[in-house]
Amino acid sequence: MFFVRIMFMALRSLTIHPLRSVLATLGVLIGVGAVVAAMAILEGMSSRMREGFASMGSNKLFVMPPQQRRGGRVVGNFDTLKIDDAWAIAKECPSLKNVMPQVALNGTVKFLSKNTTASVLGATDAYTEINSHRIVEGSFFEKADIQGQSNVAVLGAKVKKDLFGGRPAIGEKVKVMTPLGGRQFTVVGVMEEKGNVAFTNVDEQVIIPITTAMEKVYGLKSIAAIVAEAVSGADKDIEKAKEEIKKVLRQRHKIRAGQQDDFAVQSQKEFVEQFATFTNIVGVVLFSIAGISLVVGGIGIMNIMLVSVTERTREIGVRMAMGAQRADVLKQFLVEASIISFFGGSIGVAMGYGLATTIERMTRVFETITTTGSVIMALSMATCVGIVSGLYPAWKASRLDPVEALRYE
Amino acid sequence: MADLIRINQFTKHYVMGETIVRALDGVNITIKEGEFISITGASGSGKSTLMHLLGCLDRPSAGEYWLDGDLVSHMSDKQLAIVRNKKIGFVFQTFNLIQRTTAVDNVSVPLFYARQARVKEPSLRALERVGLGHRAYHTPSEMSGGERQRVAIARAIVAEPKIILADEPTGNLDSRTGEQIMQIFHELNRAGVTVIIVTHEMAVAVQAQRVIAMRDGRIIEDGGIDDAFRARMLGQERTAASLPERSPPMARPLQV
C-alpha cells in the first residue's frame, strides 16, 4: 500500500517536469525501440529460414562449386561442376535416390502481348519428386526431353495465371527471355500452387530441361548445383551419401589425396547449423548495439535524476523533517527512475514495433515478428536500466543531512 | 505537569577547518507539556542549532535529550525520523511547501510517512482548523504568504504532535499576517500543544509565556514573562538594533 502511494507520488513529481522526464527517457526509448525492432527482424528472418529449411526436406544434399571471391567479395561460382558429374553421381551412389543437376537465371516469359518475370530453372524429371511439387495440368517433361534437348516448358502456377488467366496453356508457345538468350518453348505442364520451397517461390518458376537451358538458351558449360536426396534423413545415411558423392567427384575431377575438393557437399542439416551460427552472430551484433544505447539511456536517466535530487534538496529536507526515513527517500527516487524508464520502454516498444513494420513494408523481403517474449524482455531491461541508473542519485538523496538540506538555497 | 523535554548539558561542536565552533556549549533546558516558549538570540547565538537538536534533525556532540520519556539523543536515523513524524510538527520561515502540489496533499505528507491509510479527511480537518478549508485544492503558488504559512501549520499539526517547532514563522510575513499566525499558535497552545518558537524578533518572542535567550551557545536568560521582563527584553533589542548587526530583510518594525 505504501509502495503504491510512493508510485503515485513519484508520478506526480515526474509530471511537474514533463519535458525533463521525456528527455530523461529518450535514451531508453531509443534503446528499447532498437531492441524490439532488432528482435522482430531477427525473429522474422529466422522463422522464414526455418520454414525454408523445413520445406527442403531433411534428406537433401547439395553439391555446389566453390564460391569465387575477388577482394573478399563473392563474385560468382567456379565452373568446376559439370552436368556429367550429376549423371555419374546418379549412377554410382547407391545411397541416393534422386539426383538433379540444375541451373537457374531470372528472366521474362512472354505469351502474345502478355509477359511476366520468372525464374527460369533448368532441371530434370526428378524435380517433382525432389521438391514434392505436383503437376496439375498436362505432364512434366521426361528423360527423352532431356536427352533430346526439347523446347518444352512447365509453368509455375503464378506464371500460368499471369500469362493465360483461366484459359488452358498446354500446347501453347511461350517465349522465354533471359540475360543469356531466349527461345520459344511449348508448354507441356502447369505446376500446383505451392509458395516457397527452399527460399524460392516455385509459383514464379518456368522449368525447362537442363540440357536445353545449357546448350540452347544459356550456352553454359557448367551447372549451378546438384540437388540430391539420400535414401533417408538419418544422419548415418546422409553421411554415407556425402562420402559417396565426394568419392565420385574427387575421382572424376582427378583430385589427388591431400588436395582440397573443388566442390562442396552440404546437407540440409548443415545449412540449418550454418544459419543458426549466422543468426547468433547477427543477434549478438544487434544486441550489442541495443545494449550500448540502453547504457547511454541509463546515463541520461542518472544525469537527470542527479539534477533532480540537487534541485529538490530542500524538498528532501522538508520530507525528512516531516518523518521521511532515509529508505523512504531512496524508494521515492528509485521509483521515479524506474517509472521514467518503464514509460520510455513502453513507448520504445511501440516505436520498435512501428519501425519493424515499416522496414517490412519497405523491403518486402520477409515478415517481422514481434513476440510477447521480446516485449517483456525489452520492458524488463528498461526497468532494470532505470533501477540501476537511479540507484546512485537515490542513494545520494537518502544520505542528505536534514539540517543541511533544509538550509539549501 | 510532566516534563516533555529535558535537555542535559547539550553541546554541539562543529569542526571548521582548524577551529572548533562551539554552537552549543552546555545547555540545560526543561520544558513542561503545554508550555509556550520562545527561543531568542542574535544570529550565531546557537538558537538554530538548538532548534535542530530539539527537532531531532541532528544529534548533539555531547549531552542527553529526553523527549516524552525517550532518550532521543542516542537514537538511530530511522528512530529519529519516526520521532519527528509522531511527536514534532515543523513550521519554517520560508513555509517549505512542495510546489505545484495542492494544499491538502502538502498537509498529508506527515501522514503519508506515518503509513496512515486515510489521509484526506484528517488533512482537510487540519486545514479547516487553520481556516483554510476553502483553499484545500489550491497550490502554493496561488496563495498569499499568510495562507501558505497556515497550510504549513496545518501540515505541522495534522499528525497531532505534542510539540510545534516554529523557526521564524513570521519572518517572511507582514506584521498583520504575522499576528494572525501567532494567533493560531496561541489557539493551538490553548488546545494543549507545546509551542516552541525560535525568533530573533523580540515582539514575537515576548508573546510567549517563557523566553529562553541565547548568546554564544549558552543560555543567558530563561524565565517567565512579566511586564518588567518584557520591557527589559524590548529594551535590549533596541540597543541591539542600533548596532550594525545583520537583520533579515523582511523583519518587521517593532511595535511596542
Image: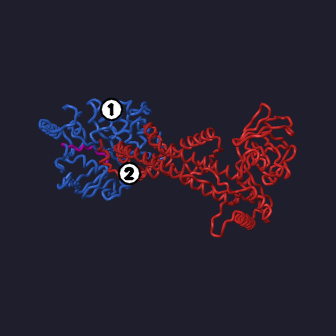
Chain colours: A red, B blue
Residue plotted at (19% across, 43% down): B41
Q: Is residue B231 left or right of residue B80?
A: left
Please rate how many residues cluster around mark 2, counting C-alpha atoms within 10 Å: few if below 14, some from 14 to 19, many from 20: many
Q: Secondary structure at mark 1?
A: helix
- Pointer 2: what residue? A398
Is residue A222 at all visible to an observer of this figure? yes
Residue plotted at (80% across, 48% down): A209
Image coords of residue A399 (percent x, y): 35, 52
Q: Nearer the viewer, residue A182 or A4?
A: A182
Is residue B192 at all visible to an observer of this figure? no
Q: What stretch of residues is rendered in magenta?
A: B33-42
Q: Is residue B120 left or right of residue B216?
A: right
Q: Quadrant of residue A33?
A: top right
- Pointer 1: what residue? B145
- What amino acid is labelled 2 in the image? Ser
Q: Nearer the viewer, residue A297 or A407?
A: A297
Please give the chain letter of the residue carrying mark 1.
Answer: B
**Label 1 – label 2 distance at C-alpha:** 30 Å
Q: Main secondary structure of the magenta part?
A: strand
Image coords of residue A145 (percent x, y): 84, 49
Q: Nearer the viewer, residue B249 or A361?
A: A361
